[in-house]
Every structure is written in structure tokens, then in C-alpha cells.
Amino acid sequence: MLSLEHIRTLCSGEIHIGEPLAPMTSFRIGGPADILIEPVNGEELSALVRYFRVIDASFVLLGNGSNILVSDEGIRGVVINIERHFSSLSFDDGVVTAGAGVRLSKFVDFCVRHRLAGAEMLAGIPGTLGGGVIMNAGAYGGEISDHMLDVTVLRDGIMRTLKKSESGFRYRGSDLRGDIVLSARFRFPEGDEEALKARRKELLLKRNAAQPVRWPNAGSIFKNPEGRHAARLIEESGLKGYAVGGAQVAEQHANFIINTGGATAADVLAVIRHVRATVRARTDVTLELEILLLGFAPEAIAFLN
């Protein structure tokens, strides 16, 4: 049985009971976590994970809350937030080492400041480095794994460092789904700082012009099917502007669902269900989710199977 007293012996960071998760997600949607924990280092995180697995207690890892949809009922059990204490960045002997909690925007700024080329394509992508590595985040022809040397993870509660070749990177995915990323190391070619700043600005302006940044959202909802664009399939199916409650398919970019105010997770899920069904009926393409669904009962998301 989960013991809060024992958790306190393993974690010197903050522990919150019944903490609302909506303010911690980019969608601004979601109920509370039974317990929210903020371990201060990898040793504490490792000890917590081993404890939860010994007692068979569920837990969810949370970065800055992008690319996820939390259920209206919240998350039963434990949520571990790593953003605050896993946000170190260093550059030594040509290698960038970044903690899993580093925001991708900060990672890009750091690389540009050190005249390192190759990270600027991540400009404007929400999320943290840990989630970006697991999802192999990317844009404009590049991916976060392109210049990666290795990644340090917790696997079955034990720290391991995996080479890039051992991580199974692919389009918007990797073999790290069952792991907890602690940090990653990168080696980038040298670039011109002013040119990198200009490229970062160009990509930010391009992203802001194409995406509904004014509204809370979780980024791209669906992966692009091979050789196709999810946004185009959705738009050609006449679904721009389709809404349930406060959740709406964005007029600006059809692969985004925005929270126009007061949207619930149930609203978003209803939009996802309708979009998938409509696109499949029209094109015979089944769109696969890019966002993660957290805290939902299996029957609520059975339509995704």
C-alpha cells in the first residue's frame, strides 16, 4: 500500500496532495493528481520508481505539460514532476549536456548562444527535452536525435546510458517509451551566431503564423501518416472549426485542437473521435495520436484501438 510517510523519506522535494493539474498543462485542462512529487535528483527519482514498482503503484511522469491531455477526473496515484529540478544545461569539450526538464526553447537559446548549429529547428516547439527525446521531436526536416550522442534513462528503476544507436529513434518515436529520460548529450557543428539567431527568428515567425499560439493547445494532435499530412486530411474533410463545447479544431491549423475557454477533456476527446472517424470514412486513413492521454479509463478511449 502506498505510504506517504515512506515517500517523504525518499524525496526531499515538495509533495502535494490533490494538486490540480490543469494549470500545469499547455491545454489548461485536467483534474487533480492524488499525489504530486518533485524529486530533486536522479537518485531520489530512482528510489521512488523502485518503491512504486515494488508495491505495484502506478505513477506518471510530467514535464511542462505539453503534448498531453489529462482526464477531467485527474490522475489516480502519483504524478512525478521533473521540470523544476532536472533543468541543468552545460557545454564542455564540444558536448552539450541537458537535463530532461529543460524546456526546448531554452535548449535552442543555449545552443544558439554557444554558436552551435542544428537545434534551431526546435524553436517554438513546446515541451521539455525529456519528452522531446522520447517523442523524437522535430520540424522542418530535422529531429532532436540528429545530433544526439547518448541518453541517460531510468529503466526498471536503474540508471542506464544508451547510445543513440541503442534508442530506436524513428519518426515521432523511439524505443524509450517505457523509460524515464534523465538527461541527454549532444554534439553540434559550429555555426555563426548571427545566422543562427536569424534562422531561429525565421522559424519562430513561421510557426507563429501557421499555428494557433493564442489559444491553449497541446501541439499537433495526430502524427502525419506516411507520405501524407494529417492537417491536410482533416482540412479536406471539412473539419476546420468543428467544435464540441470549448474544444475546437483550429481554423489556423487543422491538426491542432484549441481550448477556446472552459474546454473539458471530454470535449477534446469527442473532437478527436469525430475527426478520426470522419477522416477514416473519407480517406480510409486512420490517424494515430501524437499526444498522450493520461488518467482516462480504458473504456473512454477504446475507440482508439
Image (tube, rainbow, N blue to C red):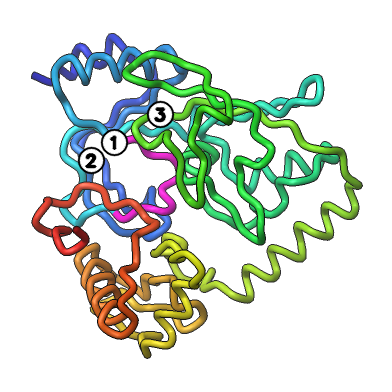
Q: Tell me the kind of residue under disc 2.
A: Ala
Mark 2 and mark 1 in contact? Answer it, CB < 8 Å.
yes
Residue at horizontal 52 percent and vertical 45 percent from the top = 136
Residue at horizontal 26 percent and vertical 54 percent from the top = 30
**Sequence-wise first label, 2 or 1:** 2
Give the foreground label among 1 and 3. 3
What percent of the width, then of the height, locates residue 61? 35, 35
Q: Tell me the kind of residue under disc 1.
A: Val
| Numbered disc 3: secondary structure | strand
Give the foreground label among 2 and 3. 3
For the N terminus, give its image quadrant: top left
Image-based side of 144 in relation to 174, left or right: right
Q: Mark 3: give few (<14), some (14-19) or many (20+) Cα within 10 Å.
A: many
| Numbered disc 1: secondary structure | strand
Q: Mark 1: give few (<14), some (14-19) or many (20+) Cα within 10 Å.
A: some
What's drawn in magenta, residue-wise? Answer: 60-69
Q: Is residue 92 magenta?
A: no
Furthest residue toward top: 9
Q: Which residue is mark 3?
A: 180
**Sequence-wise first label, 1 or 3:** 1
Image-based side of 302 in relation to 241, left or right: left
What percent of the width, then of the height, locates residue 127? 51, 48
Q: Is residue 65 magenta?
A: yes
Look at the image and tell me whether residue 241 can be seen: no
Q: Which residue is mark 1?
A: 60
Q: Tell me the kind of residue under disc 3.
A: Ile
For the C terminus, give its image quadrant: bottom left
